[in-house]
Amino acid sequence: MAQEAVLGFLEHNEEIKDSGEFAVQIGFSHEDIVNAIKSLNGFRYVDAQDIKKERWQLTAEGKTYAANGSPEFQLFMAVPPEGISRVDLQKKLGDSVFKIGCQQAIKNKWVEMGKSQVSRKVAHVDDNVKEMLVKINGGEALNQENIDALKRRKLISPQVWKGYSVKKGPKYAPKIRKPATDLTRENLQSGEWKDLQFKEYNFLAKGFPVEAGYLHPLLKARVQFIAICIDVSNVLLSSFCKIAKERGKATNADDFSSNGHPARDSHDTFFLKEPSTTKKLPEDYVERVKQIHESGGHGSRGYGYDWKREEANKNLLRTHTTAVSSRMLYALAKKPFEAKRYYSIDRVFRNEAVDRTHLAEFHQIEGLICDRGLSLGDLQGVLHDFFSRLGMSNLRFKPAYNPYTEPSMEIFGYHEGLKKWVEVGNSGMFRPEMLLPMGLPEDVTVIAWGLSLERPTMILYGIDNIRDLFGHKVDLGLIKSNPICRIGL
């Protein structure tokens, strides 16, 4: 009915100047008229132009003042000719009206506020604020100065009204003829096809978007890191694929962490209930680990305590990927030695409180090089090469402590975007107490370094809360729309 009303009006008139006024004139809701105009405009029966009108409406506070009067007027009227104490006046008006009323009444020079007494300075006042609010509520216009005064007091807010002006379109007709979409047998037999108006084909219309899989930002960054690791090593090692697939449980018997180290602490670690302990360990290796912990060897004094087999037997979710590195080095020690480079990107698990920078599970990137005669200088050179490919060529190293490396260094890089030094990883040379019990030759050294995958990914994608990147609260829109990872560019 609304469409027929619009087309019927335009049959005898050149234009509908205002859809709002037109709706009132014919007794339709403006929403129905707008919907009719949009539909007719889409089929080119009419040409519609947007109309926007800005008007002012009262806020909740403004409506209160329009009904009860402004606070300053209420305060003035509450002050008797002989004056009143501040305490009594506040009780009479209430805290809110008293506070605002005092400010405005003093500004208007209506009252005099003594230390304890309030008195009038004029005999009579007009409540201009209420008058202006009532006018606005009734649709009357005010000058800009009064509008600005009410806006500053947040008594009014703008409201935008949207409508249309309408003229005949290139396909105007007094009545709607629904275009046919198919030519039927009946149309041909009856001859009706001669008078049919067919719907035009839209050759520019796009099809439905094809839904497909999307790569998570962490996976995109991971691919880049893998490429960097391979580039640094100059050779793709088949062991890398094996490391990348490592999952699940591990014991910490194969590094030089003491039984009391946080890696075994119940507050920092997820222990498995079933199976709670490992069923099989290489006994000769276990005995050598026990000996080095209790009594030392190879120039080390050890920890000098009773090493507990039951602690080493506990199954746990790994707290760092060094457990994977240890497993690979132990496997390497069983064969005639050859230099190797290993890289791992995988999950670790820590029993930590979850906040914007910490999760109970995250990813670690770990790299190590095993060869004869490696030194701290070699480690620093590899780190400069590795991190320069991440866009961090300006590095600093700080001495640190790890139970399984000596010396150990924290790695800091100067971040051009943040304009400050940020910690980007940890590194060190594996201790002889860790390597020699495995069976590696005495002249073999191992340099290693590690960093998280989440921190550089957050920096690259401008994410400041790790829970927005990884976990069950991740927005699927982020997965679909995140750009290509451009490390080092």
Image (tube, grey):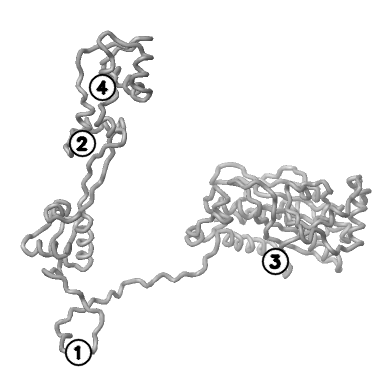
**In the picture, residue 206 is in which quadrant?**
bottom left
Q: Secondary structure at mark 4?
A: helix
Instruction: Confirm whether residue 407 shows in the render.
Output: no
The percent coordinates of residue 359 (x first, y second) are 63, 50
- 10 Å neighbourhood of mark 2: few (<14), some, or many (≥20)? some
Mark 3, residue position = 245
Does residue 443 appear left or right of residue 134 in this picture?
right
Task: Give the residue type that dot 3 points to.
Answer: Lys
Which quarter of the figure is the C terminus placed in? bottom right
State whether residue 214 is above or below residue 68. below
| Circles 2 and 4 in contact, beta carbons < 8 Å | no
Badge 1 is on which residue?
Answer: 188
Q: Nearer the viewer, residue 162 or 284?
A: 162
Which residue: 67% across, 44% down?
A: 396
Q: Estimate the spatial distance between the alpha carbons at disc 2 and disc 4, rounded to whole Å.
A: 19 Å
Query: Quick one: which residue is furthest to the top in this view?
Result: 82
Q: Is residue 147 left or right of residue 116?
A: left
Mark found first going from the N terminus, 2 or 3: 2
**Secondary structure under the numbered disc 3 in the rendered image:** loop
The answer to the question of whether label 1 and label 2 lie on touching residues, with beta carbons closer than 8 A, is no
Label 1: how many Cα within 10 Å (few below 14, some 14–19, many 20+):
few
